[in-house]
Image: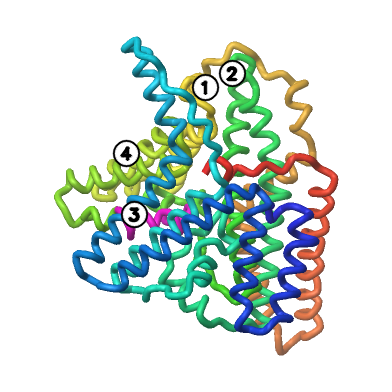
Amino acid sequence: MLFSSPLFLFLFLPVVLLLYFLIWRKLRNYLLLVASLVFFAWGGVSYTALLLISITFNYFFGLGIGKNPGSRKSRIYLAAGVMVNVLFLGVFKYADFVVDNLNVLTGILKFKPFGDPGLILPVGISFYTFHSLSYLIDVYRKVADTQKNPFSLGLYIAFFPQLIAGPILRYHDIAPQIKARTINSTSFSYGIRRFITGLGKKVLLANNMGFVADTVFGTPVDQLSGTLAWIGLITYALQIYFDFSGYSDMAIGLGKMFGFTFMENFNYPYVSRSIKEFWRRWHISLSTWFRDYLYLPLGGNRVSKYRTYFNLILVFFITGLWHGASWTFVIWGFIHGTFLIIERISKNKFPNTLWRPLQHVYTLFVVLLAWVLFRADNISYAWSYYGILFGNASVHPDMMIFSKFINKEFYIFFIISILSASGFLVKTHTYLNEKMENLQTQSVFLVESYRIVQYIFLIGIFIACSVYLITSTYNPFIYYRF
């Protein structure tokens, strides 16, 4: 079940919200856990069984860690818990990848190839595995108490707003909110606004950009022109941003409706002036998770410079693999890690000493080129696509191909996407809000009219998204790969 589906919008969410505010407060967590399991089971009951197994194992590992904090037994339970979670993720996400690569080797050595494991990637496994690891490590570090209630732990791991697309939540941040939280009209109203904003990003912007990107990347490379290749790459960059950030906005909004506060996950990454800044703005919950649970325990930058470089490369190797079981994702991670090392070697003189517009150009250029690997099905296609981008095209732009999707509607959504991704629309909104606050005592009518216009605008976005979802069959879910 997707947030951006009529079933979720008009049945699941209203029913859960209604029941949530009708039942006794002490039963609300149990309701949310049941609702989360139903939400997850919609994609396959077998997936839910795996999720329940994960929750059960981590519950007992957590008890073992917390029983003798700081002791050798505690370290053994932690090591065992981490190994089981990593193995769990590895088997279901990377078994096919490992077998495929082993079969390349067996082919060279003339050995009998291994059979295809045929495992289906469970939706959201990367996210809930990282939640489980966060719980075990937080308990071991004594920054959170052991969760004695298995249903509360289950809610943390399986809570449906963040279950399949993040943000990745830290246990020590969420544990107090599971225990007690408050909801008022202000936070609930904010949650609705944030959810509709995210829905608009996903349905109106990401889907429209994604249709063009899928059309281009679905075209054989020898039929692409340089212009089409660049259009496909830029629209994919916009699609993945609005898809990810839109789902994060919806998750944050849903959390607010139920009294939870989730961390921000995106902060206009495409305005960055370095790769380092990009990773402070892109998928913040993931980058900070790797920083706190992997990079810093490895020594971070407190070790020798070469060990620091190794730590960076290792972290981004794992970051690439986390996103997908393919060498394209691994190379994507290596590209980002390499440029982070280059920036560190220059002691931030590069790109900071460049003319400011060139800093933006440099960052966008690296990020865009890396996205080719993220989107391509294999390295061969990515390599050929790079050739088309830089003039190795054997065809001229076909205006008939352009006319299929490059129309007035595309231009409108493309311009809105650029303005939104650059932060221009939010800055304009903030500026107008400040102006209205200053006019609060001078013109109540003008201020109230502005608020009404905002509400009408949000309702319009929701109606537009609903019509799109009901009438269109194009609503991709890119998180199946993660």
Task: Count the labels in the image.
Answer: 4
Kind of residue sitting beneath label 1: Tyr
In the rendered image, which residue does mark 3 sit on? 82
In the rendered image, which residue does mark 4 sit on? 338
In the rendered image, which residue does mark 1 sit on? 381
**Marker disc for residue 477:** none
In the rendered image, which residue does mark 2 sit on? 221
User: Tag 1, which secondary structure?
Assistant: helix
For marks 2 and 3, give the CA distance: 42 Å
| Residue 266 visible in the current orientation | no
Q: Are marks 1 and 2 in contact (CB under 8 Å)?
A: yes
How crowded pointer 1 is (Cα within 10 Å; few <14, some 14-19, many 20+) is rated as: some
Q: Main secondary structure of the magenta part?
A: helix
Q: Are marks 3 and 4 in contact (CB under 8 Å)?
A: no
Whichever of labels 3 and 4 marks the residue nearer the N terminus, that label is 3
- Between tags 2 and 3, which lies in front? 3
Kind of residue sitting beneath label 3: Val
Instruction: Give the residue drawn at x 60%, y 14%.
Output: 222
- Between tags 1 and 2, which lies in front? 1
